[in-house]
Image (cartoon, grey):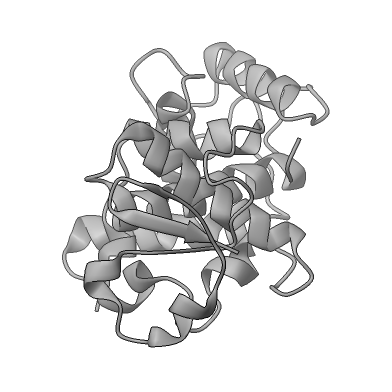
Amino acid sequence: MKFLHILGSLVLASCFYLFVFEDNASAMMDTGTRGSEVEHMQRVLEKLDYFHTTPTGYYGSVTKESVRDFQADFGLSADGVAGTNTLNMLSNLEMIAHVVHGESRGEIYEGKVAVASVILNRVQSSAFPGSTYGVIYQQNAFTALNDGQYWLTPDASSYRAAKDAYFGWDPSGGATYYYNPSGVSDEWIYSRDVIKTIGQHVYAR
């Protein structure tokens, strides 16, 4: 198993909540907690197929059970409390989903999982930063960060792709790079060993 210019108010909200999970991971949510942070967590859990009712912003028994199921699947202590490790994992999956949506929302599902896998492969490689945050925010690592598409709201399939990649499906074949030949601006990428092509993306190591 493998160890994710801003425009408009929705985009700004997405930016804010990404950093709630990433930078305020010492926070904890449990039964009785209310607020926009709880609602956002519920929406992320909903897209990951753990929360199956309307998000309310109230941390009740349904939310606790959803968190517990999420924790059990991701190898965390299944106590139903959204503490540091749980929020970090949600943050990682959310960041990956943003990259997947920004870089491959027009691709077939296999291609979306492949993009997510490249991120996780980089985290595991000594040639890249050792965290999801470090990999995604490495300078010029992903076009979606440079052109702002990263800040679009990911759809459910982008979250599922992040989840499937984390659980071990790697359609990229172990790739640490991918590119669209029609959009290459730095020919250095052609020096990498090609593994396969999925949709519009070439995957390489």
Asked if residue 114 lies left or right of residue 181, the reply is right
Q: Quadrant of residue 39?
A: top left
Numbered circles on residues, count: 0
Q: Is residue 130 visible?
A: yes
Q: Which quarter of the rendered picture does the C terminus lie within?
A: bottom right
Residue that appears at 56% across and 47% down: 117
Image location (x, y in percent) of residue 201: 35, 55
Rendered position, 165 above or below 122: above
Residue that appears at 58% across and 42% down: 90
Q: Which quarter of the rendered picture does the N terminus lie within?
A: top right
Asked if residue 140 lies left or right of residue 173, the reply is left
Residue found farthest to the right = 77
Image location (x, y in percent) of residue 81: 71, 30
Q: Closest to the observer: 128 or 199?
A: 199
Rendered position, 107 above or below 127: above
Q: Is residue 35 visible?
A: no
Q: Closest to the observer: 105 or 190?
A: 190
Image location (x, y in percent) of residue 21: 58, 53
Q: Closest to the observer: 61 or 185?
A: 185
Image location (x, y in percent) of residue 88: 67, 49
